[in-house]
Amino acid sequence: MLLRVFALACILALAHADLADPATPGCESEYKLPEPMRYLLYTVNRGEGFNSARDVYVRAAHLVQLLNARAGQNWTLVLPPFANPHWHDEQDQSWSRFFDIDLLRRETPVIELSEFLALQPQPAVVDHILYLQHNFSLGYGAAPVPADCLPEDYPGTHFQQRGGVWRGHFFGNGDVMQATRLSCFDVFGDISTFVDQLIGEPGTALLVGRLERLMHKDYGMTDFWRIRQSLVFSARLRAIARAYRPRLPAAYAAVHMRRNDFRYSHADSVAPIGAAVSQLQTLTAAHGIQAVYIASDAREDDVEFRELLESNLTLVRFSTLPTVFPAGAGLTEGEQAVVDQLLCTAADIFVGSPHSTFTVRIREERDYIGKPLNTSTLIICTATASTADETGTAGTAGTAGTAGTVPCTEEWHWRPPGPAVSPYTNRSIDWE
């Protein structure tokens, strides 16, 4: 147990080390944890997927950086395990399964939830749950206001008071975690509006419920991109994608086709399969593309999607079958989705899905490795969309009941400012 605690002390030492000085001591025995140490935990709406949760991480990490910029503050961010409603084969998953945690720690002091629990007595006690509720009448940028918990948004669906303490799911650790207090706050603003509230709170461990209800501060600016670019996929998953790459031709396109619930929640943006086939045929012929890599959440019972797979296009999908690709055997759905993103990032041309954060994250990664913008912003046109080819030249316009013959170009507003703003830019793919 002492060795375990000492190892975690080393983790925290590295997390709080002076990043400007590579010689800063990390795990020497004389290192002492900064005092007082405070922990920030947070939850994200359980309905949010993996890629939305990645976006909320940027806000949470930036919030911790703002807290630590204040004199005398020393906060560590506790990473909540991923709970993705789109994955059907796994429970909540740790961040180290997907990301290079050491690179995260170069930007922000973070630890996994399991590490936090190992440092705490049992049960681990959260001093205060601060549950956020939107209140647009406050005016954007207003300070948070203590409020009654709204019946339609009551955190009692996640936490219940029993025996004088608050109990709940706690990321699947309800048997070893509890909270002393729970309060609701009306908010309407970015993460900076909550800094004073957190600093003024007593206690060592605070949990912000529904942190996605605080917006980014300075979205798209340098601090945002430094944190975002520290989210580098794990070396293991990068190696698997690198091993798979030779199975693809030298020139290939990639398409992300969001299906599943999008067929109902965003029906107007899901193009008919016939239109997808026609537009991809035009695209591959125009650019001498030899194959199209397909990333999709389509289920086995999606009969229409099978029409695409049976078309005359040369299509490739990642396989976890040991007989097909042994290195991919045993990957979870979430890990396979990461490999999909890496292979889509490396493609010569990428065609995405509107409204999908999976597509947004791929576009960001493509920006980081220098892919031309006009090769990253294509989408499959629907019947109501205007069309343009990948160079921006107008294509065949869609008419009622049809969807044109070339992909559309979707506006893409947010890009990293100027040249690379962090040392992680080319680590996302790392093929060599």
Image (cartoon, helix red, strand yellow):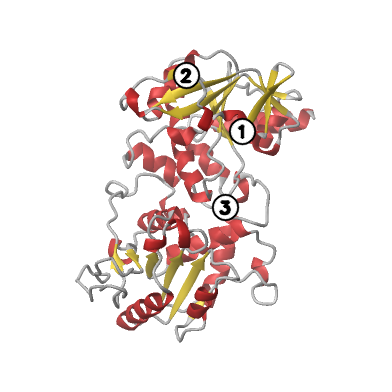
- Which mark is first along the chain, 1 or 3? 1
Q: Position of residue 53 (x, y in %)?
A: 51, 44
Where disc 3 sits, the SS reads: loop
Image marks 3 and 1: residues in contact by CB distance under 8 Å: no
Q: Position of residue 278 (x, y in %)?
A: 36, 80
Q: Nearer the viewer, mark 3 or mark 1?
A: 1
Q: Nearer the viewer, residue 11 or 349?
A: 349
Q: Quadrant of residue 244?
A: bottom right
Q: Residues within 10 Å of mark 1 (few under 14, many from 20)?
A: few
Q: Which amino acid does the dot numbered 3 rest on?
A: Ser
Q: Using the image, tell me which numbered label, if any, was put on residue 234.
A: 3
Furthest-right residue in this view: 1
Image quarter where the N terminus lies is top right
Q: Which amino acid does the dot numbered 1 rest on?
A: Thr
| Alpha-carbon span between mark 3 and mark 1 | 34 Å
Residue that mark 1 sits on: 157
Q: Position of residue 399 (x, y in %)?
A: 25, 73
Does the image show residue 273? yes
Where disc 2 sits, the SS reads: strand
- Which mark is first along the chain, 2 or 1? 2
| Alpha-carbon span between mark 1 and mark 2 | 17 Å
| Alpha-carbon span between mark 3 and mark 2 | 41 Å
Q: Is residue 10 left or right of residue 250?
A: right
Q: Which amino acid does the dot numbered 2 rest on?
A: Ala
Q: Nearer the viewer, mark 3 or mark 2?
A: 2
Residue that mark 2 sits on: 147
Q: Nearer the viewer, residue 197 or 355?
A: 355
Q: Is residue 176 left or right of residue 71?
A: right
Q: Position of residue 425 (x, y in %)?
A: 41, 51
